[in-house]
Amino acid sequence: MSDKKSMKLSDKYEPPFTLNEAIVNLVAEISAKVERFVIRLEQPDGLRLRRINQIQSIHSSLAIEGNMLSEDQVSDIIEGKRVIAPAREILEVKNALRTYELYPSLNALSEKDLLKAHGIMMLGMIPDAGKYRNCNEGVFKGNKCVHFAPPPNIVPLLMKNLFSWLKRSKMHWLIRSCIFHYEFEFIHPFRDGNGRMGRLWQSLILSKWNSVFAHLPVENLVYANQQEYYNAINASSTAGNCNIFVEFMLNKILEALKDAQKIEVEKPIAEVVHLTARQEKIIAALKKNNFLTEKDLAEMFGVTPRTIERDLAKLQQNGTLTRVGSKKDGRWIVK
C-alpha cells in the first residue's frame, strides 16, 4: 500500500510482499528458538519472568510513543502504588494494563475485537476511542510529514480488506503478523494509538501460532531500535514492498527470543554486597533508564568510560547487574 492511487479496494487485496531466502531462514531459526523459550517459561521462575515481560512490554511500547515514565514507575502503577507523574502518562499505563489483561479473550482475526481493544487502550485520551478516524492523519518527523495516511472515508474498507487477507492467507503466522503490522501502520486507522495497537496486534497474531508470544516482550527491542523501526517502515513504503519491514521485525523477534533465554530472574545474590557511592548511583540511574551506555554513564558521573567499564564489571560479578543483548542495542537488568 505504498501508493494510494494503486491501492486495490477489493476483498481480494494482496499486500505487496515477496518471499525471499532471508525471510525463510529467519522463520526457520525463530521456529527452533520458540520451543526453547517454552521450556524457559516452565522453569520455577517462569511466572515471575512473565510478569517482568509484561511490565517491560507496557513500558517499552508506551515509551516509543513518548511516555516518560520509568520501568520502575510503570511497575509501581501496575502494583497499585501511588506515583507522582502527569495524569495522562499514568492513564496510558493503566489503559495498557487493562488491554493486555484482555489479551487472552481477544481474537486476532476479529476487526470488532481490534476496535474493542483500541477503545480500552485510548479510553479518556481521545474522543473517538474504539472508532476509526474521521480526519486526515500523517506521521511527522519534526515539522515534516514523512507519511500521509489514506483519507478517512476509505479506512473502514481498507481495514476490512486487511482482515480478510489475514484470515485467508496461507503464509506462516510469523510472516503474516509482520505484514499486518506494516499495513496497519500504513493505513493509520485511528486518530491516535496506532503504534501501540500495531505492536499489540502483531503479538496477538503471533500467539495464534504459539501462545508463548503473549509473554515475549518484542516491544523492548523495538524500543531499543526506534529509528531503525521507523526507517524500516519508511523504506518499505518507498520500495512499494514490505519485505524490509518484515525482515526487520523477524530479526527483532529472533533477538527477543535469544535474550529471553538469558534472563535469570531469581538467581541468588550474596547477602552482603559492598558498593561504592558511584556504583550505587549507577544502579539508580539504570533503574530509571536501563538502556544507558558506558559513554552515557561516564558523561553523567564525570569519569572515563574505562572507569565505568570497571564498575559495571564488578556489578555484574556480584550479581547486581545482568546484561541482555548486544553492547549497542542491549539493556541492563538490575537485580
Image (cartoon, rainbow, N blue to C red):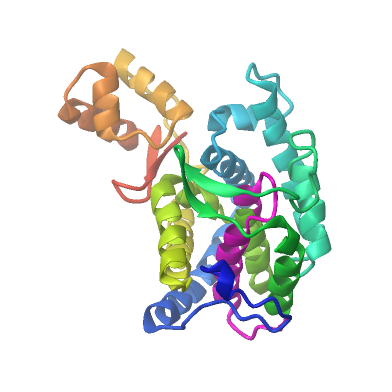
Residue 212 in percent (x, y) is at 63, 63
Task: Please report the residue visible at 45 percent of the width from the left and 73 percent of the height from the top.
Answer: 243
Task: Please report the residue visible at 74 percent of the width from the left and 81 percent of the height from the top.
Answer: 11
In this view, 215 is above or below 320: below
Looking at the image, the residue that sits furthest to the top is: 277
In this view, 324 is above or below 198: above
The secondary structure that dominates the magenta segment is: helix
Q: Is residue 329 left or right of residue 51?
A: left
Residue 207 belongs to magenta span: no
Task: Please report the residue visible at 19 percent of the width from the left and 20 percent of the height from the top.
Answer: 303
Residue 42 visible? The answer is no
Residue 264 in percent (x, y) is at 48, 47
Name the one closer to the observer, 127 or 117.
Answer: 127
Residue 41 in percent (x, y) is at 59, 58
Q: Is residue 178 left or right of residue 234?
A: right
The part of the chain drawn in magenta is 168-197
Q: Is residue 93 left or right of residue 175?
A: right
Name the one closer to the observer, 159 or 248.
Answer: 159
Residue 5 visible? The answer is yes
In this view, 146 is above or below 153: above
In this view, 303 is above or below 158: above
